[in-house]
Image (cartoon, helix red, strand yellow):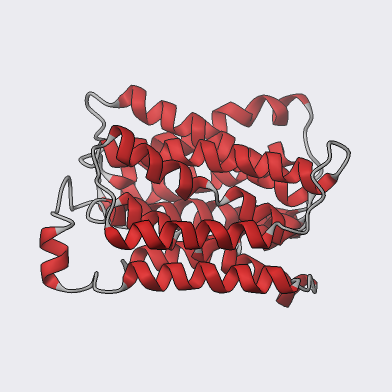
Amino acid sequence: MLYLIAANLLWGSGSIFTRLADQPATVIMFFRAAAAFATVAAYMLLKRRPLNLAGVWQWALISGLFLGLNGLFFFLAVQTTTIGTAVLACNTGPIFYITWACLFLGEKFERRTLLALPLAAAGVALLVANCELSLTSRDFVGILYGLGSGLSYSLVVVIAKRFPHIPTASLIFVQMGMAAALFSPWIALSPPVLTVRSLGAMAVLGAVHSCLCLALYFTALKTVKLQRAGILGYLDPASAVLYAYLFFGEVPAFTTMLGGLCILSAGALTLQGSTGAKSRTADNPPTGDRTAGPP
């Protein structure tokens, strides 16, 4: 559970480095994926971890495709509207994948989820309540990008949960390689003008926000239900709103603060009673390979 909390709090700062990179979304996505690919490749070589995806290569590649789209839509959203609005729209992902988990993975709704999920969704609604829903509005376009990011990421999570035996490092290696290959034509056809700051920001996005965070997240998914992971996912937008205020002076409206309170309350609710041994063995039986830790 602590891995999930750490991953989401780190993800919340991703929008800060996106602004610092100051590059088109396709460029950021390529260098982010390339940096993550290099990081996990170095980890696998040092730890002598084999690439183990027997029988699930196609799913790993599809997962990489969706992960690339997730990143692209996220960067477009952050560049189009305010960080708070963008990140909150992107974080509709938990709503999607909790639905997919119950429809396709056979998970049953927990009682805590029945209360926490609507509370978290209400928080998101409050946070975006001030947006003008118009085709000419940058906020509205940013929300559309965010919804696309949330939907594509939900498919990444469901694939990871569907195949818990896939070693975490191997999965991230293929995902990031696929994402880098997907955006390489943009780099080849229109080479970007890079600065030390932009390269540094994109390196952090790759090594920390992609590689490390995904490793923490996928490792946690081996033993945690998607419903709980989904509710804790709302720590990401809540922290992003705080980071936007601290670094860029984006002052949240009253509805934004109220929505953030709902989100944090939902996260606290899903944590209640989930740390005991009885909860771990009864609700979340260990599955899959346990050797692939964070790189």
Camera-side residue of 72 and 101: 101
Q: Is residue 181 above or below residue 4?
A: above
**Left or right of 140 in this view: 86:** left
Rendered location of residue 146, percent (x, y): 65, 44
Where, quadrant-wise, is the N terminus in this rendering?
Answer: bottom left
For the question of whether residue 295 can be seen, the reply is: no
> In the figure, residue 82 lies in which quadrant?
bottom right
Q: Which quarter of the rendering shows the C terminus?
A: bottom left
* Residue 47 placement, left or right of 206: left
Q: Position of residue 80 (x, y in %)?
A: 79, 47
Give residue 170's quadrant in the image.
top left
The residue sitting at 50% across, 32% down in the picture is 66
Q: Nearer the viewer, residue 183 or 219?
A: 219
Give the image location of residue 98, x and y in percent. Answer: 38, 46
Residue 294's place in the image compared with 26, above or below, is below
| Residue at x 37% of width, y 71% of height | 269
